[in-house]
Every structure is written in C-alpha cells, then in structure tokens.
Image (spheres, rainbow, N blue to C red):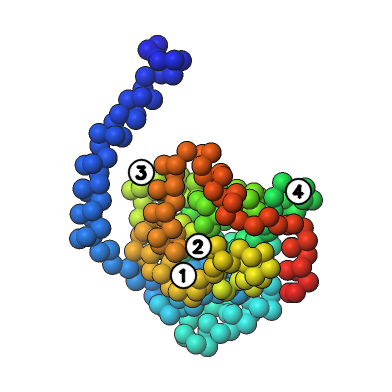
Amino acid sequence: MANNYNGVPLLYYMHFIATLLLSPIFWVIIVIRELFHRPKATQVQGEVAVITGAARGLGREYAIELAKRGCHIAVVDILEDAAKDTANFLSESFNVKAKAYKVDISDYQQLVEFHSKVVHDFGDVTILINNAALLRPSNSNPLDYEEIQKIFTINITSQVWLNQLFLPRMKALNHGHIMATSSLAAVVVSPFTQIYGATKVAVRMYMASLRTEMKQGKYKITVTTIMPTFLNTSKYALDFGVLSGTECVAPPIDGKLVAQQSVEAMLQGREEITFPRITSLTCKLQELWPTWLRDALFGLLYPKIDMTELHNRIIAQS
C-alpha cells in the first residue's frame, strides 16, 4: 500500500479506528445476545465419541458426562489397564458401548491404525475430544530436547493429526463436535509454563482458526476450547501446587464440575470457556495494561522455583 504513516500502511490505522467506532455497537449486540440467547444442548444419544487421555482425570470425567447422555465412548490412553477400567465402568454404569484403546498419540502411525480400528468397531465418529497432554512445568533451564519435542507432539501436534483423521468424515456428514482441552496457561502468564504454556497457546489459536473455517464453510460442526486452571482430578497438578506454593495463587478447582460444564458448552456450540469463568474477564482487563506492568506484577506474584528439583520431588511422590 503506497499511503503510509511512519512506514506503516494506513490500513492498519483504519483497522484500529473501525474497531473503536464499532465496539459500542458490538457491545450492545453482545449484551442482548447474552440476555436472550439460550442455546439448547444437542442430543448425542447413540453417537460415538473419541476421547484422548480418558483413562483417568478430566478425560475420564468427560467420558462419564457423555456416557450419561447415551454416547458410545472410545477410551484412548497410553495407560492400558486404567483405560480398560474406565471403559468397563462406562459400559456397566450407563448401558453404552465403550472400548479401551492403548495408543501413543505422539506416534502418527499408531493414530492412523487407531482411526481404522475405531471406525471399524463403532462406525462414524462425530465427537472428538482432544484432552491428553503432558503437564511439565518448566522455565529457561534446559530440558532434554527429546522431552521438549514430546511435550509439543502430545500437546498440540497430535491434536492436528487427530482432527485431520476424523474431520473429513464429519464434514461429509455435516455434523460433529470437536473439543480441545487447552489451559489457563494459554492466557495467564507465569514463569514456569514456558514450554507447556506455549503448547496451550498453540492449541487455542489452532482451534480458533479451525472454528473460523467451519463457520465460514457453514459446516454444522462445533469447535470448543476449554481453558481450565489446576484441577483436583490431576495428582501431578495437586502435588505441584502444594510443593511449589502456587496453590495460594491458583488453587485447584473441581474437575468433575469442569467436565460437566465443558460437555454442556460443547453441545451448546459455545466457542471458548475458561475455568474459573471470571478469569476470562480478568485476563481481558489485564491485556489493557502495558507489558512492563504485567511482567513486573506476575514476577512478584509467583514464587521462585527450582523446576528440576520440584519435578523430581513430584515424580518421587507418584
């Protein structure tokens, strides 16, 4: 663009002016929509859901919530015995079909084979919940490069792979739900989430892009991102909070409640939810602060931690 100011194309300034002028109108629309728009949850009885990391923790709670609604469940996890226990519990408690699949989601070939198996066993998959993740707090102290790669592969790359395996059929059916468990670490800065937090930011942005594409193509496929804080369903998170002293800054919340509200949000077609809900507004307000102020406050807020020693202590307690 030829016209510019201080080397910046004027179009960027026009973006700002348009946003400023349109914001009051949009806020009126937002308030009206929140007051009067009450989306009903879609019925999923008889549908098939694939849930990663479903052997225990939040993934297991997702599975229970969907099974209560009559959904058949593919329990995907690297922990084979725990996955079988969860699948048996679902089948016996809710009269649905449930099966455990031992899958290393960091291995693309295993995902391809799993995709073929689950379609053969269940038929069309119309619900995909990408929940599995490696929670490994870290700062700038070096980690083994293979461990770093594994965190990225499990936390974000596997989600891309799984979506690309299951989404084409959802598009053909023009029906489906995709939900990803991101984290509050995607929107809240802390000095000990440099790798984990980066993967969760990637999940959030990837899902936002995917959601925009689905809406642009007028597909009846909902795309929902869940961003919870530490949960009481994760022993690692609980131990981390206690041993690091961060539980006084970010206390854990009830994983069962998060699962219940997350599944409800997914079936209502909601886009993004933080847990606790109020944190979303808090983060948006903090974005208005200058970066130097946010950095200074967060630096004071969190304790200094020897991440390697802390991780080893947590593993020793497991």
Earlier-in-chain disc, 1 versus 3: 3
Expressed as whole percent of the image width and height from the top left, the position of residue 88 reads 58, 84
Q: Which mark is residue 141?
A: 4
Which residue is label 2 attached to? 228
Does residue 280 appear in the picture of this structure? yes
Is 239 left or right of 180, judged from the image as shown? right
- As shown in the figure, which amino acid type bears the numbered disc 2? Pro
Q: Which residue is mark 3?
A: 216
Is label 2 in contact with label 1 (beta carbons under 8 Å)? yes
Q: Quadrant of the N terminus?
A: top left
The answer to whether 186 appears left or right of 83 in the picture is left
Horizontally, is 35 left or right of 43 in the view? left
* Secondary structure of the residue carrying numbered label 1: helix
Between 170 and 281, the one lying in front of the other is: 281
For mark 4, give the secondary structure. Answer: loop
> For the residues marked 1 and 3, what is the alpha-carbon distance in whole angstroms?
29 Å
